[in-house]
Amino acid sequence: VDFAVEYPAVAASGAERDAFAALVAPHWPAMARLAQRLAPPGQWEDVLQDALTAAWRKRGQYDPARGAARSWLFAVVDDQCRKAYRRVRLTTELVDLPADDAGGRDLDLDRALTRLTARQRSAVVLHYYLDVPVAEVATILRCRPGTVKSTLSDARARLRAELEGDA
Amino acid sequence: MSDLEDRLRADALRLGEPAPDLDRALSVAVAAVPARRVPWVLAAAAVVVMALGVAGVLLLRPGGPSRQAPGAASSPASSAPSSAPSAAPGGLVETDDVGFSGVLLDAQDPSVLHVYVWPEQRGACGVYHPHAVVESQTAAAVVIRVAGRQELPPGATRNDCTVESARVSVPVTLRAPLGDRVVYDSLDHHEQYVLDPATVAAPTYLPPGFTGGAVDLSLYENKPVTRRTWTAPRGDRQLRLQVLAAPRSYVLVGPGTPAGTVDGHPAHLTAEPECLWWDTSASRAMLVCVQLEPSSEGAEPPPLPTAELLRVARSLA
């Protein structure tokens, strides 16, 4: 749908950028947190910028009927993170964080999270780190809530196995 | 909650570097994307050209799949490759249940529903053909499933690029008129909005030369936006006149220029496109908009005098 058709007054006034900024601003910090967790190490800022650029390019596709702005924006960030991983073909060595990067983070858990599939990691980060309800995670990942629950269950099992292995 | 879940949430509390400056990031984003503002008729033409190109390729391909009109109800089994999208780049792939976002009753046949579909956005570039299937129909409810087929450019997979597509409607026929039955989406079994075009306001006055009046359905903030559209030739371009009923928040900027009253409500005028809008309640507004298409880069006079827009607005039943 052409943006000018869906939002005639916005396009008319040249306030498209401002309207888009207003749409993004409430979710921008959470988008950054999502990128920090899901992007390849050291790339989250670039990935976040790519996500914002993609969202701006696709702003005419945003359909409130299919979910809240947050869901749409998170889906764009998630998509860009996966693309970034495909680009770098990350190795285990790159994933492992150096000890001095701790910053108070749970490095064992960080390491275990990298062992999850991309989809499991997205579900875990969205649900546990960003407190996104299961139903909304389903919207973001484009699947049914039941699928999210089973994905989270599988992820927890794998995390437990990884953490016990580390112990 | 398990120890692991506690540990995850505790880690979440420690997470976080500050987000970059949004305004600066948005400047980069805007600079990276060339101004679009493609008139919708050109966008539609581009889709048609792309569809014709893909059709030509398929027709020339030995043993290629038989084509079906976009939107036609079809059996997914009737189309060719059913391999996993990522395993067979290019060609024709089936997509999952994509859901839909509203239903428009056919103006002539109350057994026909036009299902409004927003094609999968994270699929590949190419042409997307959704189709709707009635999964069940009882005396109380109708459940509809929308899936589709995606024609990919050679070498592409569904993860390669993003569909740049518009909302489309696909027809589906019930055994009997819908009546008071509720329509559900098979994707999430949520009740879907059903619009009867007979309930959409129509003006009794139109400027000379306009024809059409088709009803269109959109949703904004999960609330219906209804449109009637007329067109009239204007040289080698056309004027498009729309009457919209929408949530009040749909009018995102304003108030525009005061322009008289409609039905006792103060009306306001915006430009490019020229829209006259007024509140009909605390939560709803009406708009009468006119656009010259394709648009031009330079400044142009308003395509219709404000008095004409007011006359259309005041004639709304």
Image (spheres, rainbow, N blue to C red):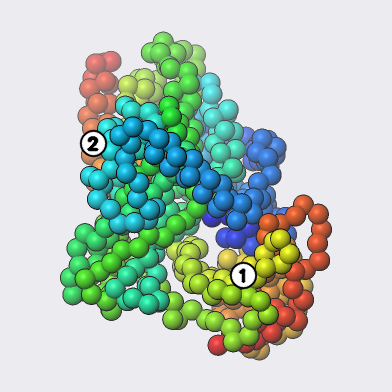
Residue name at image x 39 percent, y 39 percent: B59
Amino acid type indicated by mark 2: Ser
Q: Left or right? Give the position of B179 relative to B118.
A: left
Q: Residues within 10 Å of mark 1 (few under 14, many from 20)?
A: some
Residue name at image x 43 percent, y 29 percent: B154
Number of marks drawn: 2
> Would residue B72 be seen by someone viewing this image from the given angle?
yes
Residue name at image x 43 percent, y 42 percent: B55
Q: Chain of mark 1?
A: B
* Above-or-below relation of A80 to A66: above
Q: Left or right? Give the position of B54 relative to A26.
A: left
* Above-or-below relation of B46 to B173: above
Residue name at image x 77 percent, y 68 percent: B302
Which numbered dot is residue B286? none
Q: Are marks 1 and 2 in contact (CB under 8 Å)?
A: no
The quarter of the image holding the C terminus of chain B is bottom right
Snapshot quadrant of residue B115? bottom left
Give the alpha-carbon distance from disc 1 to disc 2, as whole Å.
55 Å
Give coordinates of residue B231: x percent, y percent: 62, 70
The residue identified by callout 2 is: A153
Which numbered dot is residue B231? 1
In this orientation, which residue lies closer to the viewer: A24 or B141?
A: B141
In this orientation, which residue lies closer to the viewer: B117 or B6?
A: B117
Q: Residues within 10 Å of mark 2 (few under 14, many from 20)?
A: some
In this orientation, which residue lies closer to the viewer: B61 or B72?
A: B61
Q: Chain of mark 2?
A: A
* Above-or-below relation of B204 to B231: below
Give coordinates of residue A78: x percent, y percent: 45, 36
In this orientation, which residue lies closer to the viewer: B238 or B227?
A: B238
Instruction: Name the element at disc 2.
Output: helix
Give coordinates of residue B64: x percent, y percent: 33, 36
